[in-house]
Amino acid sequence: MRVRTPASILAAALFVGVLTAGIGAAGSLNADPAPTTAEWVSPDPDTEALVDHRQGVMRAVSGHMAATAAILLDGAPFEENLQMHGSTLSALLADIPALFPEGSAHEESDARAEIWSDADTFRSKADDTAEAAAALAAATEGGDPSAMIQAFSALGSSCGACHEDFRN
């Protein structure tokens, strides 16, 4: 004689099995600390995605630089946004070399091969830019217009120096 199991019992058993598997998987996800930026990049990264990301970051930098210039140099009435622009630029430019991992050269990128062949100089210039961006963020917190203009000018010079050597 064949025993028929009601569908509700089968559904409940399936639910318990899936729930148990899900709880086990969730526990294993929380076992390790959050990955660092370098760990997110796989050994064989999708170069196009890396290039898209870094170009997006650089477009964001350009937008914040243009907005800051409009306020500081052209008199746009958005002084209340200066701290946001300064802190965002500092965050975006904190680790430029992370945007250029080894093997991420791409034909649709303006990055020169010297980024990787002269990595020490690139890192040095990137560090200078990160420091200049942090100085701009500090100046925007201080609120002194001449200090902000001076810090903004230094950041622009630092960006330009890196672009001169490492961007097509």
Image (spheres, grey):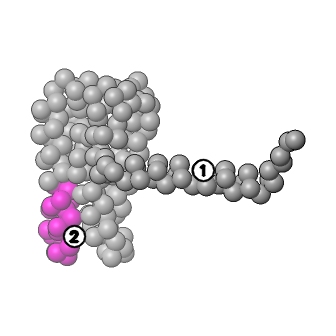
Residue 144 image-quadrant placement: bottom left
Whether residue 156 is visible:
no
Q: Residues within 10 Å of mark 2 (few under 14, many from 20)?
A: many
Label drawn at residue 140: 2
Question: What amino acid does circle 1 point to?
Answer: Gly
Any magenta on residue 4? no
How far across and how far down the image is residue 19, in percent?
57, 55
Q: From the image, tell me which residue sits under label 1.
A: 17
Relative depth, front residue between 132 and 93: 93
How far across and how far down the image is residue 149, in percent?
19, 64
Q: Do the residues bearing badges 1 and 2 touch, measured as CB atoms within 8 Å?
A: no
Whether residue 137 is visible:
yes
Residue at 46% x, 48% y: name it: 25
Question: What amino acid does circle 2 point to?
Answer: Thr
Residue at 25% x, 50% y: name it: 93
Relative depth, front residue between 50 and 138: 50
Q: Quadrant of the C terminus?
A: top left
> Which residues make up the magenta segment?
132-154
Q: Secondary structure at mark 1?
A: helix
Compare marks 1 and 2 and give the one earlier in the sequence: 1
Q: Residues within 10 Å of mark 1 (few under 14, many from 20)?
A: few
Question: Alpha-carbon distance for marks 1 and 2?
Answer: 56 Å
Residue 77 image-quadrant placement: bottom left
Q: Secondary structure at mark 2?
A: helix
Q: Residue furthest right?
A: 1
- Answer above or below: position of 117 versus 12: above
- Answer above or below: position of 167 versus 153: above
Q: Quadrant of the N terminus?
A: top right
Relative depth, front residue between 165 and 101: 101
Residue at 12% x, 33% y: name it: 121
